[in-house]
Image (spheres, grey):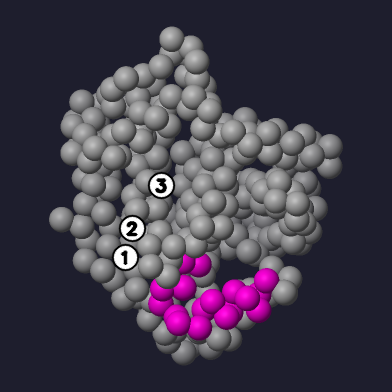
Amino acid sequence: MPDRPSTSRQQTSSGELARPVNIPPRPSLLMALQREMAKADPHITRVGTLLKRDAAIAGNMIAVANSALFNLPRRVHTVEDAILMIGLEQCRALVTSMMTRRALARGRMMMPRFWDVSEKRSWAMLHLAAKTKLARPEVAHHFGLFSDIGIPLMMASFPSYGETLAVANRMPVDKLIQLENARHKINHALVGAMLAEHWQIGEDIAQAIKKHHTPQILRDEQTSSRVRNLIAIHLIVDRAIQEYRRDLSNEWAAGGALVCEMLGLSESDVTDFCAELQQRMQHPYNEQTSA
């Protein structure tokens, strides 16, 4: 059985209780997978048996494993083979991604542009983390998926949130959090962190979600380097996505210099990263042709 729905409240800086936000229950398949993965010796066969209970998830797992995203040396034909080739941790990230979209992309949360960007971000973060070794790829994948997941949850919880987004689209991105707090007594970063905590996605991810619109955190040595690295990768990926969409990244404008300072990157380095990510965004799911 899935978790029960949770109605969460967050304490605001003024001490006033924020208005409640409905946090969807953790899917039962995700719970079972997390339990198996928490064992000292998780077993591929047991994980495969769990995933095959859901034909859509199993089929998508095989399809994604065979895509250009993983560039495997040979095609896989079974769930167990896919898990063996991409690894248990990445398997969990994939299932989480699929279950999240299934649970949230409906009703007022059916936001095509949001889910398109979320998908691009999660895969771009996986790739950049693997390339730079700044974070575990599956953790970066999770964070890319969940970083703005509070937006559809806010949309579902507050009838006027669409108006808030419309106003925010005409403002600098760093003003969105302030606008959300003023209008709804809570913001999407806190709501996203609530979901990550309720679904037990990981403490580093939850902390990064809370702070990913605060680039000054990159200089805060009291914050875990794992969290700061996730936020730094997120800013590079946001620039790549916005340029891909023929737009400017206000996020990068606010924090790009801090990212380069923290990671020792030049403008040329970042440009090259973005160009590679944008190339992958054009055809992320092209299947491999190797036998």
Rendered view: 206 above or below 161: above
Secondary structure state at the residue bearing disc 1: loop
Label 1 is placed on what type of residue?
A: Pro
In this orientation, which residue lies closer to the viewer: 57 or 212? 57
Instruction: Tell me the magenta residue range.
Output: 150-169
Residue assigned mark 1: 24
Q: Residue at x 29, y 71 (%)?
A: 6
Sequence order check, earlier mark of 2 and 1: 1
Residue assigned mark 2: 103
In this orientation, which residue lies closer to the viewer: 72 or 263? 72
Q: Is residue 128 visible to us here?
A: no
Q: Residue at x 59, y 74 (%)?
A: 165
Residues at marks 2 and 3, CA–CA distance in whole angstroms: 10 Å
Q: Are marks 2 and 1 in contact (CB under 8 Å)?
A: yes
Label 2 is placed on what type of residue?
A: Ala
Q: Is residue 162 magenta?
A: yes
Q: Is residue 92 visible to us here?
A: yes
Residue assigned mark 3: 97
Rendered view: 196 above or below 244: below
Query: Residue 86: where, in percent of width, then height?
Result: 41, 26
Q: Is residue 115 left or right of residue 89?
A: right
Sequence order check, earlier mark of 3 and 1: 1
Query: Residue 271: where, in percent of width, then height?
Result: 79, 39
Query: Residue 45: where, in percent of width, then height?
Result: 20, 26
Dot in front, 2 or 1:
2
Q: Residue at x 62, y 80 (%)?
A: 179
Q: Which mark is residue 268?
A: none
